[in-house]
Image (spheres, rainbow, N blue to C red):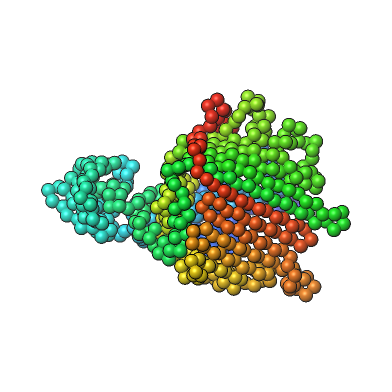
């Protein structure tokens, strides 16, 4: 009997030690707890190719090595201690670590898979340098683009003919004719001449052209910009994106004539060579409804003055939040004895200043200075400016040059949309996401949406004015057209209406009403009584405007807000940097 017991015990121990090895021999999808390989592929959205690559890597997976390298520091215990503490078997431990490893491996693969799919969708080749024109990648048959000296080089005949140019080659000199411009350069050099409208300009290439396999390569940026096009580099997609800016803006503006006329009439009231001072005032009241103890009113407000000239802005203002702070104290969100006596007045009258110019972007908020001074006593008693531009890594000159272009007499709705899209694409690129590859698609979607909502045919002329309206039915139809259909139930049985009137001087009157009805839990439907209403009306002009807003929630609150602004020319000039002697704080150093 003892021999039999010893034999059984040895068998159990052998099986328990063999279990991890047996699990490792299972397919990866089974080791991860899925019922089939397809279930795993569907859940994660990965391709068969990526799965097979991960399965090959998982064959040598060591859960203990993975835990020591990636988890032990966080849990502050060894693998054996972890299993004992959380009552995890060795097989469960292996599966858990394998799941962590798989997710860490699949995440970058999914990101690259999405990039490859995006490139393929526009006719590009993943893993290769591509060039996009008019929303599609150019097909290079016998010579492909390449990166040389950190520059995107392209075979000139293939790209220029796709752009619609005439290309000739004689005595090692290339001549291209496109959009009324004649571009000439010798192969191997860095100088080129561009003739257009009777003027000749000499351009220096940032990388010399060269011959390879009987094809002439040139920098894509040079040839695009010399042809009058914008060119962008999408690093995540390894794609140079060429865009005809003028054509893109014209397409956006095609059905926005009325809005552009409105904008130009407003811009005509500015002298862009002068400085302007604009005063803003905001007054509001929040009534908290209490039918037992009595309702209470809390007032708040703000005053702000903005100085503006060209690309430079200086803003100074104050928020009056005394009643708001008192209200938070009343409901116990904050307690008076928790706030230092010298901090309370800074919170109740919250002052702020901002300077935004081509030299930088700074803000000064005394209440933040007070808080920071508790950690950094050297700031106490000083006028402190936080360098926001430096902290965000912003190229202020580029940003303000774009701002100047946006607010100019030549600007249109189309140019505003184009330039703001470029800015958002740049920000996406800085986060290593696919960016400019989506530019054409983004502009196309934006055009379709604006044409549907605010296109010329959505306005009705009335005398010298144009009137635009949208009701609940229009909103439901629009949502369906935009691919996100709403229903009556989504709007909670309420109502929606919006009106806009564009006056002959470019000013705009607007009025909006939104209501959501109460829900009867007994009948299971919406009543005819409003549970919430929101109304907003006002006038917006170049140098003056006002807005009234009211939010009512049944038996809860009644909030009212009024905003007004007036502007005028001034001899004052906005500051372009903080005053000498003030403390400049680099937020990234904190």
Residue sitting at 25 percent across and 48 percent down?
A: 218
Residue sitting at 87 percent across and 57 percent down?
A: 292
- Is 295 located above or below residue 355 in the figure? below
Residue sitting at 44 percent across and 60 percent down?
A: 261
Which quarter shows the C terminus? top right
Q: Is residue 518 left or right of residue 425?
A: right
Q: Is residue 490 left or right of residue 402?
A: right
Residue sitting at 53 percent across and 32 percent down?
A: 578
Q: Position of residue 117 (x, y in %)?
A: 43, 59
Q: Position of residue 88 (x, y in %)?
A: 69, 49
- Is 534 located above or below residue 174 in the figure? below
Decide if residue 123 is in sight here: yes
- Decide which of 68, 248 is in the foreground and name it: 248
Q: Position of residue 8 (x, y in %)?
A: 70, 53
Residue at the left extreme, as displayed: 171
Q: Position of residue 95 (x, y in %)?
A: 61, 52
- Is 189 located above or below residue 583 in the figure? below
- Is 408 located above or below residue 518 in the figure? above
Q: Is residue 68 left or right of residue 174?
A: right
């Amino acid at each position: 009997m003892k021999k039999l017991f010893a034999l059984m015990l040895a068998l159990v121990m052998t099986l328990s030690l063999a279990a991890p090895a047996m699990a490792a021999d299972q397919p990866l999808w089974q080791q991860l707890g899925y019922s089939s390989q397809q279930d795993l592929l569907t859940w994660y959205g990965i391709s068969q190719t990526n799965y097979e690559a991960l399965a090959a890597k998982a064959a040598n997976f060591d859960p203990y090595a993975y835990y020591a390298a990636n988890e032990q520091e966080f849990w502050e215990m060894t693998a054996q201690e972890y299993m004992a503490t959380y009552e995890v078997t060795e097989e469960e431990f292996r599966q858990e670590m394998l799941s962590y490893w798989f997710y860490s491996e699949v995440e970058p693969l999914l990101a690259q898979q999405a990039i490859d799919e995006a490139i393929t969708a526009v006719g590009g080749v993943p893993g290769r340098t591509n060039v996009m024109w008019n929303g599609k990648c150019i097909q290079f048959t016998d010579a492909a683009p390449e990166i040389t000296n950190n520059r995107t080089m392209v075979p000139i005949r293939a790209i220029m003919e796709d752009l619609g140019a005439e290309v000739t080659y004689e005595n090692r000199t290339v001549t291209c004719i496109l959009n009324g411009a004649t571009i000439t350069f010798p192969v191997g050099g860095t100088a080129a001449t561009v003739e257009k409208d009777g003027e000749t300009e000499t351009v220096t290439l940032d990388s010399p052209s060269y011959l390879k396999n009987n094809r002439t390569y040139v920098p894509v940026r040079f040839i695009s910009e010399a042809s009058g096009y914008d060119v962008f580099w999408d690093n995540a997609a390894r794609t140079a994106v060429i865009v005809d800016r003028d054509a893109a803006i014209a397409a956006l503006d095609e059905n926005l004539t009325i809005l552009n006329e409105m904008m130009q009439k407003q811009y005509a009231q500015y002298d862009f060579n002068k400085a302007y001072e604009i005063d803003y005032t905001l007054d509001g009241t929040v009534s908290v409804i209490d039918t037992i103890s009595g309702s209470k009113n809390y007032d708040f407000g703000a005053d702000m003055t903005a100085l503006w000239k060209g690309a430079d802005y200086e803003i100074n203002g104050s928020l009056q939040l005394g009643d708001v702070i008192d209200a938070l104290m009343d409901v116990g969100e904050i307690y008076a004895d928790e706030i230092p006596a010298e901090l309370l007045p800074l919170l109740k009258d919250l002052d702020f200043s901002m300077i935004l110019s081509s030299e930088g972007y700074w803000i000064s908020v005394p209440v933040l200075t007070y808080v920071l001074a508790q950690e950094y006593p050297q700031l106490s008693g000083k006028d402190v400016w936080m360098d926001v531009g430096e902290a965000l890594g912003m190229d202020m000159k580029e940003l303000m040059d774009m701002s100047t272009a946006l607010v100019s007499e030549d600007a249109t709705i189309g140019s505003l949309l184009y330039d703001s899209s470029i800015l958002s694409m740049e920000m996406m690129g800085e986060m290593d996401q696919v960016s400019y590859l989506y530019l054409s698609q983004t502009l196309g979607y934006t055009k379709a949406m604006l044409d549907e909502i605010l296109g010329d045919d959505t306005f009705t002329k009335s005398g010298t004015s144009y009137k635009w309206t949208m009701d609940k039915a229009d909103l439901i139809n629009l949502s369906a057209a935009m691919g996100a259909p709403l229903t009556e139930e989504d709007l909670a049985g309420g109502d929606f209406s919006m009106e806009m009137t564009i006056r002959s001087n470019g000013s705009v009157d607007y009025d909006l009403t939104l209501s959501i009805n109460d829900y009867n839990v007994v009948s299971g439907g919406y009543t005819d009584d409003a549970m919430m209403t929101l109304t907003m009306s006002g006038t917006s002009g170049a140098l003056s405007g006002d807005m009234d807003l009211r939010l009512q929630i049944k038996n809860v609150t009644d909030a009212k807000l009024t905003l007004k602004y007036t502007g005028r020319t001034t001899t004052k000039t906005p500051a372009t940097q903080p005053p000498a002697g003030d403390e400049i704080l680099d937020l990234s150093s904190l």
